[in-house]
Amino acid sequence: MLGRGEAVGVGEALSILRSSYTAPEPGREEVSLHEALGRALAADIISQTALPEFPRSSMDGYAVFSADTFGASEQIPAYLKLAGEIVMGEAAPVLLLRGQAVAIPTGGMLPEGADAVVMLEYAQALDTGELEIMRPVAPGENVVQPGDDIKAGETAFTKGHRLRPQDIGAMAGIGITYAPVFKRPKVAIINTGSEIVPADKTPRPGQVRDVNSYTLAGMVRLAGAIPVLKGIFRDEYGPIREAAESAISECDAVALTGGSSVGNQDLTAKIINDMGKPGVIVHGVSVKPGKPVIIGVVSGKPVFGLPGHPVAVAVCFELFLRPLISEISGKIDPLEALGIPGVRVVEARMARNYSSVPGREDHLGVALRKDEGELWAYPVLGKSGLIFTLAKAHGTAVIPADRPGIAKGEKVMVRLFD
């Protein structure tokens, strides 16, 4: 614990949390597809129909029996009798006989007897009512067969899949308009500090407007959870503990901002310990900014004591709360199983030298610029209490704990903000 020993590494802190807390499966609900974006499926989605449900053309052209075109060329065309046309949105009205062709638009239903489509540019309708074909087609050419997209009985999406716009469109395509999803977890936000006043108030000397509630609530929403704002509390044990106990009873996780350092008015660790076992499991992580972060478990729910500085809040959220929210949302990220981070990461070159302390993971806010086709990361320097250093940055360059720094021109991985 901070002040009583060495701070632990980021990976160790996450391991301690996982060994002390088991995320329960969230509740379930059904929502309209219009409300399902970003939600995690609570059950597998099985298609009850094939898509497409009928053979259809993938080109504008002419539906034919492919054998009638074999050997066709510009020098020796094949000639078929035109027997009508297919209208979009209607069942094919004709039975195609050998030696016949029908005009068909892209997406049109193939008539019975046809097994291929000659593209418009390789055929010419003649005044005699015949069709001149200058290129052969193979069986199935330019045709989308029933079930080519998905077959009846096939699993479209698995439980835990986070729904994207294209997934929602695919579900609509197989006639599913409501999705079974996990309920979004609730994350309580308790802002502490005698110096904090609401953002709509004019602060007196020594006071500052509330920044963290707004920043943290936005991050919680983007991560797929529901922020529950409990208010701003002075550095007093009783009101903060009462708010924390209420938050634990109502929500799936709790985040307190401020009060995580070692000092006379820093009450977060004491409150977490007093509320129940195991209480505080980590106090102090080898990360900059955010070293004083507290991680606890009370009544089977995770409780975080975040530093009061906005940049430290953002870094600690990305490291600890975002992966937790993903877990308690029921999400399964298939890309993470492939070793691809769940957050967007780009590679860039450092625009200047930056020194770090070995043994500490540094998260440096950077602004990205492109120069001669390469991305460069420019440090946005400032103390962790300055919110506009965060607002001006595109993401954070991560300096690993085993590095003494990054030299100008060296490549770094940048975690992009949402």
Image: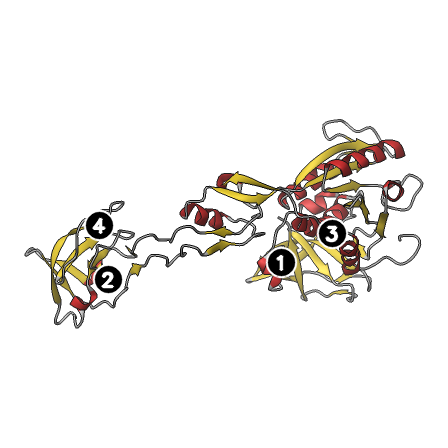
Q: Which residue is mark 4?
A: 92
> Is mark 2 in CB contact (under 8 Å) with mark 3?
no
Say whether disc 2 or disc 4 marks the residue closer to the N-terminus.
4
Considering every residue shown, the one lying at the far left of the view is 128
The front one of 109 and 58 is 109
Identity of the residue drawn at 80% across and 37% down? 244
Write down the residue under mark 3: 22
Around disc 4, counting alpha carbons within 10 Å, would you say few (fewer than 14), some (14 to 19), or many (20 or more)?
Answer: some
Q: Which residue is mark 2?
A: 115
Q: CA distance from mark 2 to mark 1?
A: 47 Å
Q: Earlier in the sequence, mark 1 or mark 3?
A: 3
**Dot 4 amino acid type:** Ala
Kind of residue sitting beneath label 3: Thr
Q: Residue at x 75, y 26 (%)?
A: 201
Residue at mark 1? 345
Mark 2 and mark 3: Cα distance apart in space: 56 Å
